[in-house]
Image: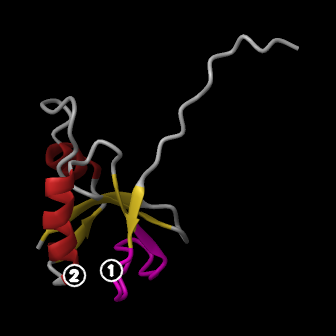
Amino acid sequence: MSHNQPLRKKVMIASISPGYPVYCPKCNSTRVVLFYDPRFTPRLQSKWDILIDEKRILLENRWEKIKVENQWSILEKDSEKPNWICKDCFDGGVVLNE
């Protein structure tokens, strides 16, 4: 058995508990987890924490809209929007400002 494999760095993501029900747009479940990409900047995280606390968010799961909102063709380093996943139907996407 070889021990020459490089160690994998564990990626930590921060999840958010809004304190109120958030409904999956696909199956209407409330088992939705909101989370920040590991590259999310603290300044933006504070801004989104306020929007989430004030219930000023929408869950987006349409692929074309997710690609536009995440700006994957433009941004290389930082994520600008939190993400979400449903623990019931495993749909997911991006969190938008209402």
Q: Are marks 1 and 2 in contact (CB under 8 Å)?
A: yes
55 in relation to 1, above or below? below
35 in relation to 71, above or below? below
Frontmost residue, 8 versus 56: 8
Q: Residue furthest bottom?
A: 20
- Image quadrant occupied by the N terminus: top right
Categorize mark 2 by other alpha carbons within 10 Å: few (<14), some (14-19), many (20+).
few
Q: Secondary structure at mark 2?
A: helix
Locate residue 71 relative to residue 61 in the image: left or right: left
Say which residue label 1 marks: 18
Residue 46 sits in quarter: bottom left
Frontmost residue, 71 versus 5: 5
Q: Residue at x 62, y 24 (%)?
A: 7
What numbered label is drawn on residue 53?
A: 2
Q: Residue at x 19, y 52 (%)?
A: 65
Residue range in magenta is 17-33
